[in-house]
Image: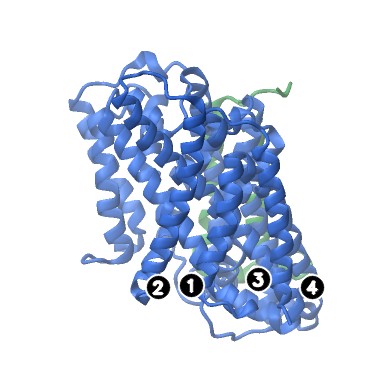
Amino acid sequence: MIRKRKIPNKVAAIIFAIYVALWVPLFIPNTFPNVPELIAGIPAFLLWYWVLLAFGWLFFSYWILTS
Amino acid sequence: MIPPFLIMLAVLFVIYAILGVLAYRIPAKSLSDLYLAGRGIGAFALFMTMGATAASSYSLMGAYGYYYLQGSGFLVWPLSQIPLVVSTWIVGKKIFAVGRKYQHETLADIFGHYYKSEVAALLSAILVFLGAMFYTIAQVVGLGWLFMTLAGIPLNVTILVVLAIMGVYCTLGGLRSVVWCDIVNGLIFCIIVVGAMALLLPPALEKGFFAAIPATHFTTPGPLGIWTASFAFSWTTFMFWAGAVPWYVQRFLAAKDLKAARVGAIGGVFLSAFTGGIVGPILAYAMLAYMPGVKAPSDQIPLLIVNKLSPIFAAIYGIGVWAAAVSTADSCLVVAAQALAKDFWYRFVTKIKRGSEVPAEKVARMGRLMVIVTTIISAAIGYGALLSPELMTTIIMFTAIAWAMSFPFFLAFIGMYWYPSLRISKEGFIAASILFPAIAIPFQFGLGVPKNPFGIIGYAWGALISGVVAYIISIFTKRPPKELYVKE
């Protein structure tokens, strides 16, 4: 349906594993209060999380549309 | 004076009824026409209906209350929508392919055929029926507090009103009217959530917004110490197998083409990720900055705060919660009715008649009748639960259980992909279908055993133990036939 490059399932699986590993810092207690607020006073925890959500959403939507 | 919430609800009911009548005018000559919309749901409709079905009242109430009380650890819930979207497609692609090839209509059809077993079909039908039925009731009684607060209507009347409204359009148009109403409901709750955010941001910014919130809200395990790593990751595994829930399966079987199925899989989690993960934390933290220290159950906090800001907007927010709840409940109602009609009645009748044709009009009539029967059973269970607070709590617990129950299905689908190494035999499937609820539910709720041992949720324990047992049994029993599903 979409004439875009197909992502091999094995590559998608490896990216999925790395992606889930990137969640780990979120769950190390008291990591994020010590990280400076980068943009407009938004807590670093939220920024990290939003980047993960956006990346995961875009990457895996692309994988579904091309697989 | 009639409460504004009820006026808006009446307008919505008229819209639902019109959509139901329009769907009724498209002739239904089979159960597939009624419960799978003639296998003709397009990409946009599938995107919206899967999203609206996944987003429940919890997405607009309980979830925001959790951010408020438990802090950012709860973000694992929207984040786990990414594993869910992956698993939804892994399962959905297979379901779409085999459903088209063999004209299957339900999970019981799929597993009855794959395992050539009536027991596997029956077990699937029971799991689907119970999960969908109780999820319907959980959503309906979950609206009780909302109706009481915004319209002064007691729970016994709420149960009747909600089920009557849903019963009308579900009976008229089956899945087709559910899908159309879901599109309306999905748009409604997305717009209302964004509106609520816009309304709450200015007063929250005045108070300093993020600066006004304690730092413990932006780290784990959060102010209540709940979100430890093991707790969070076990929730994520739960979301990973939830890709095989019956209301997703039904929609993959109803997809018009592969493109629609793909887009539906993406949509399946989008609306709840949008309301819960993108707008949700901003809205919830705006609530916290604006009005800290609200002492109430998590699923009541959002409405209490919005009500403080503007009672009229609280009524509108209530409509958003209604739209999210009812778009889930109607889908579950139709899934439960489909199980009754196809997996119990039709299977039974065709057995008695030994394969001879049942007239199309009778099939379609019985299909509609089963929606009415399911609605009445739901009302009866809802009324039964009114007898004691313990029963009511148990019913509400079924929200998550209904999702969790899809584990045996997910296990079997994974076995089709990684055949023969991860195959699940008939005996393995049956064992997992019985063992999973028997282990998961006691450990999840601490019924006679420790609750969530080692900080890992009971559902994950159920999946781990029943999964291992199913794999071991599958090694020593006959392999399911490769030629049927594996090479799709």
What numbered label is drawn on residue B156?
Answer: 1
Q: Are marks 4 and 3 on the same chain?
A: yes
For residue B323, above or below residue B3? above
Within 10 Å of disc 3 (Cα), the crowding (few <14, some 14-19, many 20+) is many
Q: Which chain is blue?
A: B
Residue B336 visible: yes
Q: Where is the N terminus of chain B found, in terms of image quarters?
A: bottom right
Q: Name the residue at 58% across, 54% down.
A: B166
Under mark 4, the amino acid is: Leu
Q: Secondary structure at mark 3?
A: helix
Q: Secondary structure at mark 4?
A: helix
What numbered label is drawn on residue B284?
Answer: 3
Q: Position of residue B205 (x, y in %)?
A: 79, 78
Q: Name the residue at 55% across, 35% down.
A: B34
- Residue closest to the eye, B470 or B103: B103
Instruction: Give chain A's shade.
Output: green
Label 4 marks which chain's residue? B
Q: Earlier in the sequence, mark 3 or mark 2?
A: 3
Label 3 marks which chain's residue? B
Q: Earlier in the sequence, mark 3 or mark 1?
A: 1
Q: Nearer the viewer, mark 4 or mark 1?
A: 1
Q: Name the residue at 54% across, 72% down.
A: B299
Q: Earlier in the sequence, mark 4 or mark 3?
A: 4
Q: Secondary structure at mark 1?
A: helix
What numbered label is drawn on residue B386?
Answer: 2
- Residue closest to the eye, B148 or B60: B148
Label 1 marks which chain's residue? B
Q: Are marks 2 and 1 in contact (CB under 8 Å)?
A: yes
Q: Position of residue B80 (x, y in %)?
A: 53, 51
Q: CA distance from mark 4 to mark 1?
A: 33 Å
Q: Name the residue at 32% across, 21% down.
A: B420
Mark 4 sits on what residue? B199
